Amino acid sequence: MQISDNWPGYSLDLFTYPQHYYGDLEYVLIPHGIIVDRTERLAKDIMQDIGDNDIVVLCVLKGGYKFCADLVEHIKNLSRNSERFISMKVDFVRLKSYHNDQSMQDMQIMGGDDLSKLTGKDIVGTGRTMKVLLNNIEKYKPKMIKVASLLVKRTSRPDGYRPDYYGFEIPDLFVVGYALDYNEHFRDLNHICVINDHGKAKYRV
Ligand code: HPA
Ligand code: MG
């Protein structure tokens, strides 16, 4: 699903969001309900592709936890209503590569032991994060690796990385909400929103 560069978004007045973020946001890029509905379709596509294989979901924290939780829930519900029940294990890895709204050179990878078969992530921007992670996972020689990302950014410096499944291709904007943060703030916002200059200044570190 493409969100074009001139998409104006939705006015914040059309929705509810935490009062402590009043004045910090520009507009709603993707409302929560659309995120959930699109994720359900990704779950269906994934189930079709994995066939009879059981899966290990590797959730990339912290920004991927909402997407991962909703994706797992949808796979579970869809598989309950079908012939074959897919067995799932969920594991977590933590990556950190952003400071303020800038991607940093060094990346930290923490945790995760049973790395195989399927990964879920929040954003693919430069693709650098994902490449580092995949190099680490391939050492464990899983039968199949699939990457699902809620968002893919149209950045000016992409390095050719494309996830197997993604929810939305978005403009090169810094977004927050649905577990995505700006210096650890805004994870408790349901919708994916664009932060304004006031919000950036307020939570700058
Ligand atoms: N928002 C939050 N975290 C991120 C982003 C973003 O737009 N891009 C990469 N990490
Ligand atoms: Mg972050």
Image (tube, rainbow, N blue to C red):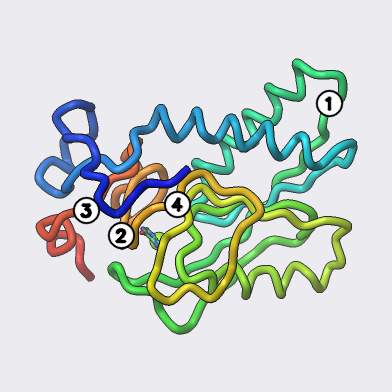
Q: Which mark is residue 85?
A: 1
Report the Cα–Cα distance between label 3 and label 1. Answer: 41 Å
Query: Mark 4 or mark 1: which is in front?
Result: 4
Quadrant assignment for the C terminus: bottom left
Q: Residue furthest bottom?
A: 105
Q: Residue at x 84, y 68 (%)?
A: 140
* Label 2 within 8 A of ligand 1 by Cβ: yes
Lateral position of residue 24 relative to residue 194, left or right: left
Evaluate if marks 3 and 1 touch, with contact meaning CB atoms under 8 Å apart: no
| 96 vs 7, nearest the viewer | 7
Disc 3 crowd rating (10 Å Cα; few below 14, some 14-19, many 20+) is: many
Q: Nearer the observer, disc 2 or disc 1?
A: 2
Residue type (three-letter) at the residue carrying disc 1? Phe
Res. 169 mark? 4
Q: Quadrant of residue 43?
A: top right
Q: CA distance from mark 4 to mark 1?
A: 31 Å
Residue at numbered disc 3: 195
Toward the top, the furthest residue is 81
Instruction: State how far apart marks 2 and 1 are (Cα).
Output: 38 Å
Residue 18: x and y in percent read 22, 35
| Residue displayed at 40% across by 79% down | 104
Badge 1 local density, few (<14 within 10 Å), some, or many (20+)? some
